[in-house]
Amino acid sequence: MDKRIIAIIVGLAVLLGRGLAGSTETIAKDTGVKKNIPSLDNIGFMKNPPKELKEKFPMCDVFLKVEWIDKKKKIGYAEYETRLFNDKGILQNDIKKVWALVNLDDEWPSYTLDVYQYKQQGRMKELYEMVKHGKPTRVPMHFAIKYKGDLTVFYDPISPVLSDHQQTVCIAYPDKQRAWIVEGKSVKQTYKSEQQEELSKKIKESGKPFSNKWLESLWILDINFDGKEDFVIEESFAATWSNKLYLGDRVYKHPGFQLIFQPNGRSCRLNTFGTFPLTTDGKNYYISNQCNLTELTSNSEKE
């Protein structure tokens, strides 16, 4: 077996033993500028997004720049600034620069696949050849590429923070027909304390338990396009119906979940236990590219 592959496998075993957080020092470096949050003009954001993107996806405040290596495979390359989690799962204050692959797989998308060593060692051409001519796969929790008989595994850190949840950050698909919302404006960063208290009261009316940490982490979006703010994080959501806020129900249905919105009795199925990416085509929001969240929470009659 190739020594490089053995090293990767050993490294993977170490990372799995330590948990997914891993050490940020192996995947990024300091920007040299000390600040408490990533800049709202993050170097990874498009400076002047095409008019077509801004018009099609008005919910996106900024777009991450991606150089698409293989549009058919939906795999590209990105550089950006971020805060990362340390070995203990704590979000660090220092800003790091990340070099990563972007993979828009329907169920397990990622924009954090570490390629720091390729960039540092001047091996980007080698990486691009691997992406173009290799076969994407999983082993089993990590993204990998099989190329020329070798299997290269890419480490994927957890949830980097690009704008401190002050903007809705999107990655447009290569065909520009859909966008993945990778970071939303959170309740904690957007609402004043009195607004958070009011939101808490509205959610308590649903009679379902929740934590303040969950409340603060919710992303603010109008998911059913009725002009009123709704809230979503992963597979959890709260939507306004007749001026009242309702939480969605999640019911286990092997091999996945059933999402139910009680006011209209609608439901949709999620056949996944992995990540729950939120995507949009500009007119609808989708969870895991399976469940139409807009249709699920809409006040209008189904056609």
Image (spheres, rainbow, N blue to C red):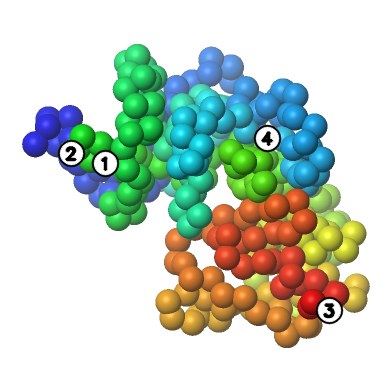
**Cα distance in 3D space between marks 3 and 4:** 33 Å
Q: Amino acid at mark 2?
A: Gly
Indicate which disc, 3 or 4, sits on the residue closer to the N terminus.
Answer: 4
Q: Which residue is mark 4?
A: 63
- In the image, residue 66 above or below residue 88: above
Sequence-first tag of 3 and 2:
2
Q: CA distance from mark 4 to mark 2?
A: 36 Å
Instruction: Write the residue at 75% across / 80% down.
Output: 206
Residue 146, label in figure: 1
Distance from disc 1 to disc 2, alpha carbons, whole Å, reads 6 Å
Q: Nearer the viewer, residue 98 or 209?
A: 98
Marking on residue 149? 2
Dividing the picture into quadrants, the one containing residue 297 is: bottom right
On screen, residue 202 above or below 27? below
Query: For mark 3, what is the residue?
Result: 301
Nearest to viewer (mark 3 / mark 4): 3
The picture places residue 4, in percent across and down from the top left corner, at 17, 30
Q: Amino acid at mark 3?
A: Glu
Q: Residues within 10 Å of mark 3 (few under 14, many from 20)?
A: few
Helix, strand or loop at mark 1: strand
- Label 2 CA crowd tier, 10 Å (few <14, some 14–19, many 20+): few
Viewer-side label of 4, 2: 2
